[in-house]
Amino acid sequence: MTDTPTNVTKEKSLNFIEHIVTKDLENGLNDGRLQTRFPPEPNGYLHIGHAKAICMDFGIAQKYGGVCNLRFDDTNPQKEDTEYVNAIMDDIHWLGFEWGKICHASDYFEQLWDFAVRLIREGKAYVDEQTSQQIAEQKGTPTTPGTESPYRNRPVEESLALFEKMNNGEVPEGAMVLRAKIDMANPNMHFRDPVIYRVINKEHHRTGARWKAYPMYDFAHGQSDYFEGVTHSICTLEFVPHRPLYDYFIDELKEGKDLADHRPRQYEFNRLNLTYTVMSKRKLLALVQEGLVDGWDDPRMPTICGLRRRGYSPQAVRRFVDMIGYTKIDALNDYAMLEAAAREDLNKRALRVTSVLDPVRLVVTNYPEGQIEEVECVKNPEDPEAGTHTQTFSRTLWIERDDFMEDAPKKYFRLTPGNEVRLKNAYIVRCTGCTKDADGNVIEVQCEYDPESRSGMPGANRRIKGTIHWLSADHCVPCEVRLYSHLFNVENPSADERDFRELLNPESLQTRTNCYTEPFAANLAPGTYLQFQRLCYATPDKSSTPEAPVFNRTVTLRDSWGGK
Ligand code: ATP
Ligand code: MG
């Protein structure tokens, strides 16, 4: 397999951030260095939106010979956990990326503290003892100036002493904050004396009990970029209004040094929003904690581990990110595009397997009882090197219930009395009838085979319109198949006024327990990419065992939305 054609198209059309980077490198900015970072907060598992950021941060460093660090933005011990740290590292590796170093915002707590103390000394920060509600009320609006805090001009020594107290456990959470003293009338609300430190009386997963005062995002992020030597700090559009503050703190930090060409710069692209799902970590966490899904890696979740368990390949995820691209306009992307990317990629990769998900018995009445034949099946028609395996043919088979119809319309090319179909890789059979139970349900279909028509035989060339798949009833294994559809019932749950729990699709998981598959498929490891021929892409679930195989349907073979 070669990926040259995609590379060629990429060369032709750089995205806007690649244009910026190319220009900066040409101009020798930052001594011609390129350094990015991917800065997750370890307060949840990564989702497909993060994959978009990862492909940008790591991808651009890779493409232009730079380096991308993994930086844990661990400034809030309340929600952070090492479970998330480990999961984040796994997911980045799975996507196929490697970081230069692992860094943490907490690596800089000492430096940030010193910087904050310096700002207090210079009269550029003060401890405010008002409640967060009072502070919010004084913010003003974009068109009316805010009100100054009564603590704004308190003596430097007082602020220094209180800041110390904020950090030694004497101050309850919420009782005081440290604010930068900037401009309460600034049209950019982020400049209206932003809170830069708050008290959190909880142990940190890395720094333990050392700190009680923790820096806010705006006071940690840009400085961390600066300490690390990041050149291009790429993030999503909601940070556009934060950028002036990002630059402000770096200017303060550099203390007169000429950073003209040696400073991190923030660039923003549109975040990924997907139909029929949510991307907010808060909501995803609630789904997990309230047992509304089967963990972070539930195959219906938009998380990377969910997609992986569902049977997506990393290449499919990356292909999807390529398809949607990077712009400066927020949009809602169609879930169908993600599925299209999966089909495109899995078609190249998936091992073809026969499974019957809704079985009905087919008896080949003129095939000798007790006789069996091994027929050859191509493992992957898209990959000649994958080779073949065999499948056992016999007199009694399982076929899909909807591959038979007693009173079929004219264009029905599958089994109906009098009609011929090919049993894939085996014989042409003519349907002769069916048996029904007392309620009129078909319990068996009968047919006769043409002994000269086996695939590869001279008599096999007859033109037959329909081909169906089958399993020999005595040579297959029972299995469970989980059919997934959208987790939510509405296209854009995030824009809906109702509680997101009310919008869940009650039919997002359909478990089929009476399915059959080929014996070898029962032994495959989770993460093996499969195509259940004529049906769907699939993969063994993590709960699958050779005795009780379980498969997840990744995606149907064709987009059935609006169709059928
Ligand atoms: P939170 O809701 O907790 O703020 P977050 O989704 O912003 O979470 P972070 O861990 O802060 O998650 O994100 C790490 C990086 O991933 C950030 O640079 C962020 O811009 C990016 N990112 C997060 N969500 C998306 C998304 N939907 N599309 C593209 N990038 C995203
Ligand atoms: Mg965030």
Image: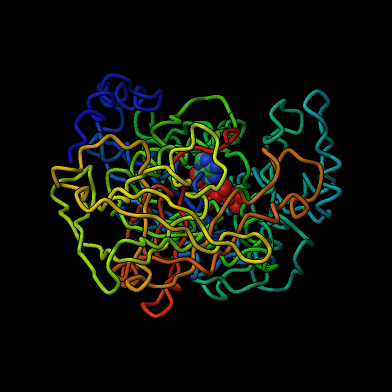
Q: Nearer the viewer, residue 451 or 14?
A: 451
Indicate how the structure is coloured in the image: rainbow
Lateral position of residue 198 relative to residue 42, left or right:
right
Coordinates of residue 157 in the picture (x, y in percent)? 69, 57
Q: Residue 464: x, y in percent? A: 32, 37
Number of numbered discs? 0
Tell me, yes or no, if residue 77 can be seen here: yes
Q: Is residue 111 visible?
A: no
Residue at 80% x, 37% y is: 139
Q: Position of residue 84 (x, y in %)?
A: 50, 65
Q: State the residue in front, 553 or 56.
A: 553
Residue drawn at (67%, 38%) of the image: 491
What residue do we see at 72% from left, 36% from top?
A: 192
Q: Nearer the viewer, residue 484 or 18?
A: 484
- Vertical arrangement, residue 124 with respect to residue 508, above or below: above
For residue 231, what is the image quadrant?
top left
Residue that protrudes farthest toward the bottom in the picture: 547
Res 87 quadrant in image: bottom left
Name the side, left or right, on which 529 lies relative to 145: left
Q: Which residue is depicted at the point 32% across and 51% down?
A: 423
* Quadrant position of the C terminus in the picture: top right
On screen, residue 310 above or below 322: below
Of residues 554 and 300, the one nearer the viewer is 554
Q: Is the N terminus in the top left, top right, bottom left or bottom right quadrant?
A: top left
Where residue 281 sits in the image (x, y, percent)? 61, 54
Question: Is 536 above or below relative to 33?
Answer: below
**212 versus 67 height, above or below:** below
